[in-house]
Each structure stands twice: as structure tokens, then as C-alpha cells.
Amino acid sequence: MLDEKLDDIYDEVLRRNPAEPEFHQAVREVLGSVGPVLTKFPQYTAQKIIQRICEPERQIIFRVPWQDDNGDVHINRGYRVEFNSALGPFKGGLRFHPSVSLGTVKFLGFEQIFKNSLTGMPIGGGKGGSDFDPKGRSDNEVMRFCQSFMTELYRHIGEYTDVPAGDIGVGTREIGWMFGQYKRITNRYESGTLTGKGLSWGGALVRPEATGYGAVFFLQEMLKVQGREIEGRTCVVSGAGNVAIHAIEKLQQLGGRVLACSDSQGYVYDPDGIDLPTLRQVKEVERERLTKYVEYRPGATFHKRGNIWEVPTEVALPCATQNELAAADARLLVANGCLAVAEGANMPTTPEGLDVLRAGGVLFGPGKAANAGGVATSALEMQQNAARDSWTFAHTEAKLGEIMSSIHEQCAATAEAYGRPGDYVLGANIAGFVKVADAMVALGLI
Ligand code: NDP
């Protein structure tokens, strides 16, 4: 239930943004937390901060024409939603996936505002992408697509304006092709314009690992409050991409036993624990489907179209995509004695799923807090670019650890201050919101 005033605002969001269910979901979740803040700080209502924060500063939609290897022409749609720059330049990834629509990009951009605020770094929120499907495309095809995408995007971005990074379907390879095209068009080696770059051309150590590692650090902090640790616990991680692989790596380094991971076709169960070198060989070197994993590991089984949440586990990290953990999945987790869920992906748990986890007493780390390590390390990459410096792995990982622990502390302290101890969703939403709202008030009517 929303407060009456917020209910009206939400209705207006629905009316102004039809057919964007993921965006509606993300807005509703934040509005569900901020009621008490409006009572405490009436200036936010007077300044219509909620209405302003729900309206992106700028939305860019563009045509992306490209040619495949046979010379056939394809047309995709590109998006960049520059949502809020009260705290710094717009910052957020680019997603290449056939499911991408304006509503997807808006939900991700909206979440990004509060996530970036929680990091404590000077970055605003934005997101972008395309409905382009990189699967099954040759390197040359993906490169031509990236070049065409950047041929339009370049005029909207820059180190002081908007700094994109990767997300689903966009890793170091794609960032390289986009950065190359940006450099070529602008004639400027402006490293701070994109993050997630390769090490030899302006990238930073720990950026590839940061989202997955950060989610595990957040999990570790949540468990610590209860006097528990990761060591010896069974873990299940959905996804098999950048975030999942690095979450698995950190869980294993901390003594967790990761039994399963997944992709969009099903999940792998490995009773001896997921073998990371094999997973990396299949996903990063061969760029193959996860089914290939079981060819290398005869003890493991692939469950086609299977539901990964049916695997009994103490710890669950959804690291694939939005709304992948629904109420029925949450019931399975609770029935199997799951202690904690930390979201590596963005909004992977449905509102009904969250209700079930809450009722089951499961610790829950929401994505905007738990997966903020990726964007925080992107901001560290920007710092290094600006200073023409590069830090060691150990130094950067230690910084990431400090940032995640500070985010955990902010969420926990805010939840406590608002009378809901242990509610990290409320804590993250309020702590993230207040900083942005204060900046918006201070900057005048923007
Ligand atoms: P990748 O493209 O590297 O991997 C995505 C993984 O999720 C793949 O295993 C993919 O399987 C699976 N997946 C994607 N879409 C679906 C779907 N519709 N149904 C089932 N499985 C799906 O992306 P990332 O690891 O970078 O991103 C994963 C999540 O983490 C996303 O929600 C992203 O927004 C979030 N995130 C990422 C950050 C980053 O730094 N990269 C930062 C913060 C959040 P398949 O190959 O079969 O499609």
C-alpha cells in the first residue's frame, strides 16, 4: 500500500509512461519506501522531488543500421536515458539484448540513480542499450553494430556529461569497439567517457570482477550481523555471465560451496561444486552455451529449462536478469532453508517473491545496494583516468570492500532509524533517495 499522495503520483507515472511494466515496478518499489521521508522533510513535497525524480532529464532513441556478413541490412533501435544528474554526470551501463525496450532502459536508469547515490561517488544515473541480439553473430558483425551505435551515441556522452559502461551483452570487447569509434569520430583519447575498458587502453583492475565480488561482500556483511559467515555454506548463483562468474569466484575464495549456475536455457548442477576454470573456458574463451560445461565435467548435470531455485541452498545470488525469482521460486528457497539472498542482477526478485522471502525471514540484499560495486569501481576507473594513474588489484579490491561495507552500513543504519531494522530494501531506497533529493533542492528547479 502506498500513502495517498504517493498513490496519486504513481497513477500519474502509469498514465505518462504506458506499457512500461518494469519501469512501473521499479518506481512502485521506491515509492513504497519513501512515505516516511516525505513526512520528515516537507520541502521534498513542496519541491515536487518525487514527480521530478520519476521523469528522466532526457531520453534519446535512435536508429542503428548495420550490415551482417552476407551484406544484408538490419535496423535496430538504440536508447540512452539520462535520468538524473544531480550528483554527477549520468552513469550506467548499456544492455544489448533482444528484450530491451524503452521501459527496460527506464527501469534500469531509475534504479541506477539510487544505487549510484549509495556508492557515495559523484555520479548521476542513466542507462542505455539496444534490442540488438549479439548471440550467434560474428565478431565483425558485433563490431559493425557497436560502431554504428556509437556513431549516434557519441554526441550525447562525455566524461562530464554521460559515461556509459557494460551490462548484459556488453563486456570489454564491445566497450573496446565503441571506445575506438568514439575516439575516431571525436579525435580525442577521452578515457573517462566509457568505463569497463581493457587494461592496456585505460581500463582499471577489478572492474570486471567488481559487481560479482561486491555482491558477495554485501552478503558477507549481512551474514556478519547475524554472527554467520560464508565459509562452508551451500550457494546457488543464477546466470553465467560477468556478474555470476565473479560472484562464484569470490564465494569460493571465501569457502562457499557453489552447486549450481544457469543461463537462459537451464541450469547446471555440479555436486562437487562449480569448477570455475571449466565455466570460464566455456563462457569466456569458447563463448559457448552452458550445456557445454557438462561435456567437460561428467559428474555434473544440465537441467534444460529447469528452475535453478529448486536446488537446496543456504545462500542464493540471482545474477542473471530482472524478475527471475518469483513467489513460487521464493517458496522453494524458504522451504529448503535458505538464509540469505543477495541480488547481483538488477531487480531479479519480483515484489511477490520479496514478500515470500520477508515472511520466511530470509536476509535480503536488494540489487541497488548489493550490486553497486560495479558502478562504484567504474567511478574508481574514472578517478584513475582523470589522474592518469593506475592502481594495483589489491588496493582497488580493498577500496571496493570498503565501499560495500559502507553501503551496507548506510542501509542498515537508515532502516534502523526509520523503525525497520534489517529491512535493507527500505534502507537502500531511503538512503539513496535522500542524497539525491537534497542535491536537487540545492541545485534549484532543475
Ligand atoms: P552477461 O551478459 O555477462 O550475462 C547475463 C547472464 O544472464 C547470462 O548467463 C544470460 O544467459 C543470463 N540471462 C540474460 N537474460 C536472461 C533471461 N531473459 N532469462 C534468463 N537468463 C538470462 O550480463 P551481466 O552478468 O553483466 O549482467 C547480469 C545482471 O547483472 C543484469 O541484471 C545486469 O543489469 C546486472 N548488473 C551488471 C553489472 C555489470 O557490471 N556487468 C552491474 C550491475 C548490475 P544467456 O547467455 O543464455 O542469455
Image (spheres, helix red, strand yellow):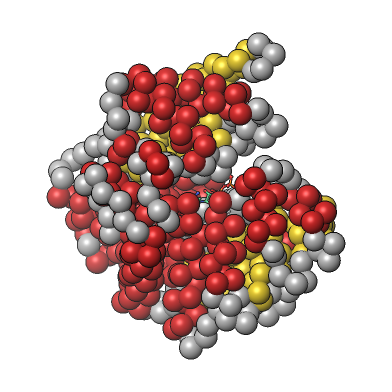
- What percent of the width, then of the height, locates residue 334? 67, 75
Q: In the image, 205: left or right of 159?
A: right
- Tell me which corner region of the image, top left, top right, bottom left or bottom right, holds residue 93: top left
Residue at left offset 75%, top offset 72%: 272
Query: Residue 247 or 412: which is nearer the viewer?
Result: 247
- Tell me which corner region of the image, top left, top right, bottom left or bottom right, holds residue 100: top right
Report if residue 138 is visible in the image: yes
- What percent of the width, then of the height, locates residue 224? 46, 82
Q: In the image, 417: left or right of 22?
A: left
Task: Give above or below for 55 relative to 253.
Answer: above
Residue at left offset 46%, top offset 34%: 176
- What percent of the width, then of the height, locates residue 369? 42, 62
- Farthest residue in the front direction? 200
Question: Which quadrant: the C terminus?
Answer: top left
Residue at left offset 22%, top offset 59%: 42
Q: In the image, 387: left or right of 295?
A: left
Q: How many marks?
A: 0
- What percent of the width, then of the height, locates residue 95? 52, 38
Report if residue 433 is visible in the image: no
Residue at left offset 35%, top offset 41%: 202
- Farthest residue in the bottom direction? 227
Task: Give above or below for 78 relative to 95.
Answer: above
Query: Residue 437 or 340: which is nearer the viewer?
Result: 340
- Tell me which corner region of the image, top left, top right, bottom left or bottom right, holds residue 196: top left
Query: Residue 432 or 27: which is nearer the viewer?
Result: 432
Q: In the image, 45: left or right of 320?
A: left
